[in-house]
Amino acid sequence: MSDPIRLSKRLVELVSCSRREAELYIAGGWVMVDGQVVEEPQFMVSQQQVTLHPDASLTPLEPVTILFHQAPATGMDADKQIRADTRAADDASGIRMLKQHFVRLTPCTPLEPNASGLLVFTQDWRVARKLIDDAAKIEQEYVVEVAGEIAPDGLKRLNHGLTFNGRALPPIKVSWQNETRLRFALKGVQAGQIAHMCEKVGLQVLAMKRIRLGRVSMAKLQPRQWRYLMPHERF
């Protein structure tokens, strides 16, 4: 029986490639050990069967962006909930899931305090720059469950006429979705702003959920599940 060696070294022997190429193949999810994909070049093998997928490519991995539906009051950080077993079954992105997709994820555009809904994590510096540096320009949409009796001119004041942290708020779009839910569409939202606005017109916020960031909607993504941002989607 031969001594165990690194998977990358075994692949070099099998396909006559360089060590760097072997590592790229492995990190890209193109290498199987006894029929199971292994993505760690340092994985030790001895007598196992090592195979390279016939469609294997040396193209470096493209950075991914992940959309996650944060459930209310989970008590667990969102990034800890993004795992292989929480990917949405109806993810239509066509992206092959790899372990490398779960590292170096940057969280972008935090939720309002105590809110649930759409969160974005990305490996793509372009997406991060768009969502972080241009946050004040990107419209966010929240559905807010409220209780209480709204002031006679409350809806009008929610759209324009309130202040927050000593400054007048710019016009935003607020409308009733049903008898107990308001829809807020606003840019540059500040932490605590929506609850403050509701309080000023006689309403108490019971729950709020972000359902859209820019042009990207959470749609049917279920709580505690995630999907990849599809190639055609833009914030």
Image: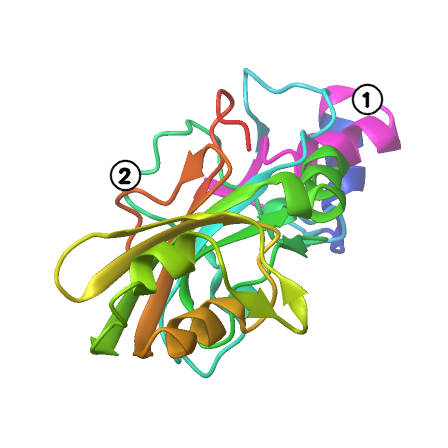
Quarter containing the C terminus? top right
- Residue closest to the far front: 152
- Kindly identify the amino acid type of the residue bearing the numbered disc 2: Asp
Seen as rendered, the residue at the extreme bottom is: 75
Image coordinates for residue 21, horizontal then vertical, percent: 81, 26
* Residue 17 disc label: 1
Rendered residue at 24%/67% (across/down): 152
Q: Give the image quarter of residue 20.
A: top right
Residue sitting at x 72%, y 44%: 7
| Comes first in the chain, label 1 or label 2 | 1
**Which of pointers 1 and 2 indicates the residue nearer the eye?**
2
Q: Position of residue 133 (x, y in %)?
A: 76, 44
- At label 1, the amino acid type is Cys
Check if residue 102 falls in the magenta segment: no
Residue 6 or residue 95, whichever sits in front: 95
Circles 1 and 2: CB distance less than 8 Å? Answer: no
Q: Categorize mark 1 by other alpha carbons within 10 Å: few (<14), some (14-19), many (20+).
A: some
Q: Quadrant of residue 122?
A: top right
62 or 127: nearer the eye?
A: 127
Which residue is depicted at the point 86% across and 33% down? Answer: 19
What segment carries the magenta color? 15-38
Q: Is residue 120 visible?
A: yes
The residue that mark 2 highlights is 90
Q: Quadrant of residue 125?
A: top right
Quick check: is 18 in the magenta stretch?
A: yes
Q: Which mark is residue 114?
A: none
x and y percentages locating residue 49 in the rendered image:
55, 39
Q: Is residue 194 above or below residue 230?
A: below
Q: Residue furthest left?
A: 179
Coloring scheme of the render? Answer: rainbow
